[in-house]
Structure formats: structure tokens, C-alpha cells
Image (spheres, helix red, strand yellow):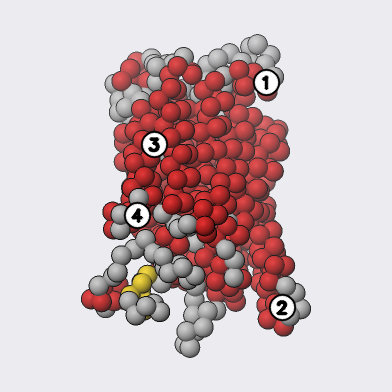
């Protein structure tokens, strides 16, 4: 729906009454940075447990299962509470839960330490860590349920997709530093080359918990206006129930698109280290032989000599390289925000979805360095998917936006289910073949974007595209 000439002159953060809410937007964007950082650490955790506990790839995917289970269990309660607590109350509740989950990693590390004395089993230690992962995800559910839709109302509706992608750029920055910290504490070694990751894994989580406590204080005393969403479909005037949102095809299909997108994202992110390193059991590696010259200078820390006598990317080196993947992700977000101001949101999403289908196909074919490059390209093309699907899905739902938001967040459960399938295929065949799973997921995303105008009966999202001159 096109804006009026007056509204089109407003900036990204200027409300209809002329009030500038940029400070509020910056404060909300810090939450995106927080959960990006935490997700970045989780994405390089799988290989740690594969090595420390002797897990298969499919078993280590329980890290993602626990993480996204927290989202699934709390998505509806978070939406319900956010509707009653307001924007600020929902944010503070989420931060408190995240802090509790971060502090839990301290006793979890004590439980793992007890495995060395035979007092508890390694499975018990693994479950203890999974409980912390799930708890943090529960808190992040509150933050995402509130923060994602809140960015869409902090200014003119025509720039809703642009604002949410700008905020998600902060999420991308957090995702860059998460793997770097994870590499430092999950894959650390002593002077003898013995892994010390099990003794230091808790440190970054405890530090995050302290920072989150400080954020709670900041939000408590900061202005967070309780802005209402536009009711483009007049759902409130019809005294609509929650069921009314299920009569909107663009929302229903957004839930499915988000399920498959997050499934693809979780699989690619969590198995990135496995893609870059040699399989300890089969010796399979997607990365071709690395020249000896690369093992010197600034790049030396990325490699280690394998049993076959050739240079290979080490686990710690791969975790560090994951940050480069997230740099690609951030660049995609920044450039995507620019594109979304000039082209229809659904068209940009359809293009990126189709390009990721091609990238996954080239990885599946195991084409050496081409496949390796496509792993990084997949990060770039995934960049705008979550926020754009979110903005397209909640379009025009007015007062039911928070409830609709909780369902879209609940769809994140896809990240718990399909990575286990991806890991199973990798265990049976190899990592390249497992990319058939995200390939299928991206097909669904691309189709949703392509058919969005028919589903929503709107040509583009609030004029963000050809009808609005952007």
C-alpha cells in the first residue's frame, strides 16, 4: 500500500507526530547484537561436543534441537505475555531469562568436570549444557518476539522491511564475533596441545550474563514507547480472534517459509566446521589439498598437519573462518537493506532464495574450491531472509501482530528438526550430500516470495518496490 506524499518525506525513524525515535531503535538494535553473538557461539559448538564426547554429527545436532526447542516452547507464552506486559516488559522479561541461562553454564561446567572422575556420565554433562542452551533460547524468544515487530513500527510503514534489516545488521555483527569467541574458549589447547575447551566453555556465557544484567537496568530506565501497529486489514474492528490471522494466506505461508529457512540456516551454520575440516572417521573433506606455503605467516594459525601429512584447516581455524562467513552474512544484510529500499521486498527475497538453491546444488556436487566458495555465498544470500519473511508475514495484521509474531518465531523449530536429518545424511554419505536438505528448504522460501503478492493481495510491501519508486 503506497504512502501519502507527506509520509514519504519522513525519515526512517520519524513518527506521524514528528517525534524521532532513533535512540529507541538503537537501543532495540543492541538486542539483535546480543542474540547474534549467542547464536554465533552456538553455531561453532557442535564440533566441540563431537570431539569431547565422541558424538556423531546427527547427535551433536541436539545442540540446535535444544536451542530451537526453547524457541518453540516459549513462542506462544512469549507472545501472550508481551501483549500484556507491553514492549518494554517483554524485553526485560527476556533479558532476565537470558542472564539466568548464561549463569547456568557455571554449574554445567562443574558437572562436566565430574566426568573425569567417573562421578557422572558424559551424557549427563551434555544434557546439562543443553539445558543452558535451551534456557538462553527461551529468553531470546521473548526478545525476538518483541524486537522484530517493534522495529517495523518505529517510523513510516513504507520502511518497515528496511528498518528490520538494519536492526538485523547488528545481529550480523554479533554473529561475526560469536565464532571468534567460541574458537578461543571451545577449541583452546594447552602448551602440550591438549584440548582445554571443556574447562573454559562456561567463561563467555557467564560474561554475557553479567552484561545482560546491566542491560536490564538500562531498559528499565529508558523510554520505550508502546506504539500500536497499523491495522491495515481492520482485524480489530471486526473483533477478530487469533483465528483471524490464519485466514491470511501471506501469514500462514510465512510460518512455513520461516520454518524451512531457519532449518536451512541452522544446518549450514552448525556444520560449517565439518564442511571446512577433514572427517576424523572417513577422512572426507570438501576442501582440496592446501599448499604448504599457506601454513606460514598470518594464516598459519588456521591449519594443522593431518594424519595424511597434508595441511588441513583445524577445528579452531574453521571456527575462526566462520566469522568470515558471518562477514558475508553482514554484507548481505547491508546490501539487502539498500535493495529493499529500491525494489519490492518479495522480489529481493525470491532472487536470494533462487541463488541459494543454486549455491546448495554446487556444494552437493562436491566441486572442490567452487563448493567451498558456495558455502560462503550461501551466508550472503541467507542474510535478508529471516527479517524479510518476518516483515512480509506480519504485514497488515494490526493489533494481532504480537500474536502473529509468536507463531512466526515458533516456526524457528525448523532449526531443531532438519539439522538432525542433515547430520544423518552426512554420517551416511558425506557433508556435500547433506546439502540436499537446505536446497529443498530454499526452494520453498523462493516460492513463497514469488507468490506473496497473490497471497497478500498487495502488489508490494507498503510501496517498498516498483509502486513506491524504491
Whole-Å distance between the Cαs marked 3 and 2?
A: 46 Å
Question: If you read the primary sequence from the N terminus, does the residue marked by circle 4 or circle 3 appear first?
Answer: 3
Whole-Å distance between the Cαs marked 2 and 4?
A: 42 Å
Question: If you read the primary sequence from the N terminus, does the residue marked by circle 3 or circle 2 appear first?
Answer: 2
Q: Are marks 3 and 1 in contact (CB under 8 Å)?
A: no
Which label belongs to residue 114? 2
SS category of the residue bearing label 3: helix
Instruction: Look at discs 4 and 1 and give the one toward the viewer.
Output: 4
SS category of the residue bearing label 1: helix
Which label belongs to residue 353? 3
Which label belongs to residue 97? none
Q: Residue 287's x, y, as percent?
A: 34, 63
Can residue 158 be seen here? no
Whole-Å distance between the Cαs marked 4 and 1?
A: 46 Å
Q: Is residue 177 left or right of residue 358?
A: right
What residue would you read off at disc 4?
Answer: 366
What residue would you read off at disc 1?
Answer: 243
Amino acid at each position: 500500500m503506497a504512502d501519502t506524499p507527506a509520509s514519504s518525506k519522513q525519515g526512517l525513524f520519524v513518527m506521524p507526530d514528528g517525534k524521532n525515535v532513533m535512540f529507541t531503535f538503537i537501543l532495540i538494535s543492541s538486542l539483535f547484537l546480543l542474540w547474534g553473538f549467542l547464536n554465533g557461539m552456538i553455531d561453532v559448538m557442535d564440533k566441540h561436543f563431537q570431539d569431547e564426547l565422541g558424538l556423531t554429527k546427527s547427535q551433536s545436532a541436539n545442540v540446535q534441537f535444544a536451542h530451537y526447542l526453547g524457541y518453540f516452547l516459549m513462542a506462544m507464552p512469549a507472545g501472550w505475555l508481551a501483549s500484556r506486559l507491553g514492549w518494554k516488559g517483554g524485553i526485560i522479561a527476556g533479558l532476565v531469562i537470558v542472564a539466568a541461562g548464561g549463569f547456568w553454564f557455571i554449574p554445567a561446567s562443574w558437572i562436566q568436570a565430574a566426568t573425569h572422575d567417573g562421578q557422572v556420565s558424559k551424557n549427563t554433562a551434555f544434557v546439562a549444557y543443553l539445558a543452558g542452551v535451551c534456557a538462553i533460547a527461551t529468553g531470546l524468544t521473548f526478545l525476538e518476539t518483541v524486537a522484530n515487530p517493534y522495529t517495523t513500527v518505529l517510523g513510516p510503514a513504507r520502511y518497515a522491511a528496511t528498518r528490520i534489516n538494519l536492526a538485523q545488521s547488528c545481529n550480523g555483527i554479533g554473529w561475526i564475533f560469536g565464532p571468534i569467541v567460541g574458537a578461543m574458549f571451545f577449541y583452546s589447547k594447552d602448551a602440550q596441545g591438549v584440548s582445554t575447551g571443556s574447562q573454559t566453555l562456561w567463561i563467555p556465557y557467564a560474561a554475557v550474563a553479567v552484561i545482560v544484567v546491566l542491560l536490564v537496568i538500562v531498559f528499565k530506565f529508558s523510554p520505550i514507547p508502546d506504539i500500536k501497529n497499523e491495522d491495515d486489514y481492520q482485524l480489530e474492528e471486526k473483533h477478530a480472534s487469533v483465528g483471524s490471522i490464519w485466514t491470511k494466506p501471506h501469514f500462514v505461508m510465512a510460518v512455513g517459509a520461516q520454518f524451512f529457512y531457519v532449518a536451512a540456516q541452522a544446518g549450514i551454520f552448525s556444520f560449517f566446521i565439518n564442511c571446512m575440516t577433514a572427517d576424523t572417521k572417513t577422512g572426507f573433506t570438501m576442501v582440496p589439498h592446501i599448499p604448504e606455503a599457506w601454513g606460514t605467516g598470518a594464516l598459519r594459525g588456521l591449519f594443522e598437519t593431518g594424519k595424511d601429512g597434508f595441511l588441513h584447516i583445524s577445528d579452531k581455524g574453521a571456527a575462526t573462518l566462520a566469522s568470515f562467513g558471518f562477514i558475508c552474512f553482514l554484507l548481505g544484510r547491508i546490501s539487502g537493506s539498500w535493495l529493499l529500499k529500491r525494489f519490492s521486498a518479495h522480489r529481493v527475497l525470491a532472487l536470494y532464495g533462487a541463488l541459494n538453491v543454486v549455491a546448495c546444488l554446487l556444494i552437493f556436487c562436491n566441486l572442490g574450491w567452487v563448493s567451498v566458495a558456495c558455502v560462503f555465498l550461501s551466508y550472503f544470500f541467507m542474510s535478508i531472509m529471516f527479517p524479510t519473511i518476518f516483515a512480509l508475514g506480519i504485514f497488515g495484521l494490526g493489533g494481532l501482530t504480537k500474536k502473529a509474531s509468536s507463531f512466526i518465531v515458533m516456526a524457528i523449530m525448523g532449526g531443531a528438526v532438519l539439522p538432525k536429518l542433515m547430520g544423518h545424511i552426512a554420517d551416511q554419505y558425506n557433508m556435500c550430500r547433506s546439502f540436499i536438505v537446505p536446497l529443498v528448504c530454499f526452494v520453498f522460501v523462493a516460492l513463497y516470495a514469488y507468490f506473496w503478492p497473490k497471497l497478500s493481495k498487495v502488489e508490494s510491501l507498503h510501496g517498498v518496490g516498483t509502486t513506491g519508486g524504491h
